[in-house]
Amino acid sequence: MKTVTTIAEMRAACLAARQGGKRLGFVPTMGALHEGHLSLVRAARERSDAVAASVFVNPAQFGPNEDFAKYPRDLERDKKLLASEGVEFLLTPSVDEMYPKGAATIVYVEGLSEKLCGRSRPGHFRGVTTIVAKLFNIVAPDAAFFGQKDAAQVAIIRKMVRDLNFPVEIVACPTVREPDGLAMSSRNAYLNAAERKQALVLSRALREVEKKFAAGERGAGELMSAAKTVLAREPSVTLDYLEIVNPETLDPVPNEDARGALVAVAAFVGGTRLIDNVVLGGKRKG
Ligand code: PAJ
């Protein structure tokens, strides 16, 4: 694996691969890698001739009172994992390399960026789309791989790619979970033993929704209250949002029909903000 810290080196390495006729897959990450990240690398390998990745904790997507400073970082471990998964090119830039003094341009997807996590994390998605656009310009991948775990992020990046004509295919990959159902996240490392148990209420609430949906319930309101009943059993967990939305527009679905809807939840477990979601089956109307 060729690991570089400068944009120029990454651009040259990726360009050479593409000019050699290789289809290039790309997996952007913030490191502290787990099986969720590695599943994206495996998906990228299956669908590409060479895989590029990045590890960059992007300050622009963290709010002033969020965890940028304490976000878990273990670059040596990340490098070993990515090398063993067959990544060919890895970019691990400094903040100054990605945001040199005077950088003033942002990429902002209007509307979608204020929904779901965007409502409680102002500026978050603007930071995400700006860095992902920059990384796409550096790597110029044929396809880029993102986790469905961050469903709003997928919707917003798809919209950015359409609106700005990036010649890249966006591939969304399923959420990887711990055996007990907790969605894998670099932030799970913040949880103590008690919080780790409490955190299970998120996936439990979503499973309850899926169960009710499978039993024939189609009403978004009914499905919401089923989830809320489960969440209320863990009063130490503070709900940020629970929404049943169209997975593309992120707007609430009509109350009478939750088919094909995204059920998304965010909650604080102790000081840690966790998110999870499921997409319900069936065909959406319209
Ligand atoms: P990060 O949180 O490191 O996640 C990198 C990628 O891994 C994202 O596409 C995310 O959705 C995916 N991922 C995380 N947990 C997952 C899980 N349990 N199952 C499947 N995929 C999972 O998302 C970001 O970084 C950043 O916003 C980034 C896109 C890199 C821009 O800075």
Image (cartoon, rainbow, N blue to C red):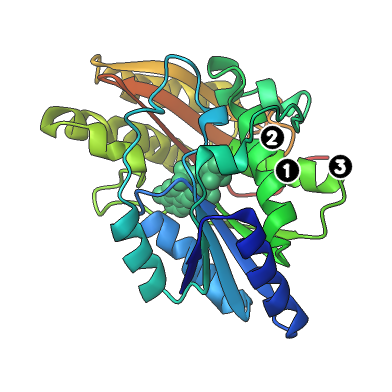
**Is disc 2 placed on a helix, strand or loop?**
loop
At a point 50% along the width and 44% down the height, the residue shown is: 94
Whether tag 2 and tag 1 are in contact, CB under 8 A, the answer is yes
**Mark 3–mark 2 contact, CB under 8 Å?**
no
- Looking at the image, residue 233 lies above or below residue 182: above
Residue at image mark 3? 163
Residue 143: x percent and y percent? Answer: 69, 64
Of residue 11 and residue 159, the one placed in the foreground of this image is: 11
Whichever of labels 1 and 3 marks the residue nearer the N terminus, that label is: 3
Q: Which residue is mark 2?
A: 246
Residue at the image point whose x is 44% and y is 63% from the top: 39
- Could you tell me the amino acid type at mark 1? Arg
Q: Check mark 1 vs ligand 1: CB closer than 8 Å? yes or no.
A: no
Q: Residue at x 27, y 31 (%)?
A: 199
Q: Which residue is mark 1?
A: 284
Q: Position of residue 103 (x, y in %)?
A: 71, 30
Characterize the local packing of mark 1: few (<14), some (14-19) or many (20 or more) Cα atoms within 10 angstroms.
Answer: few
Q: Is residue 150 left or right of residue 137?
A: left
Q: Disc 2 residue type?
A: Asn
Q: From the viewer's side, name the closer residue of 108 and 211.
A: 108
From what the image shows, is residue 217 above or below residue 231?
below
Instruction: List x then y, in percent, for residue 23.
Output: 70, 77
Q: Secondary structure at mark 3?
A: helix
Q: Is residue 263 left or right of residue 85?
A: right
Coordinates of residue 253 in the picture (x, y in percent) = 69, 28
Q: Kindly report the distance in space between the C-alpha atoms of the residues bearing marks 3 and 2.
A: 19 Å
Q: Nearer the viewer, residue 172 or 54?
A: 54
Which three-letter amino acid code belongs to the residue tagged 3? Asp
Is residue 264 in sight in this rendering?
yes
Residue 278 in sight:
no
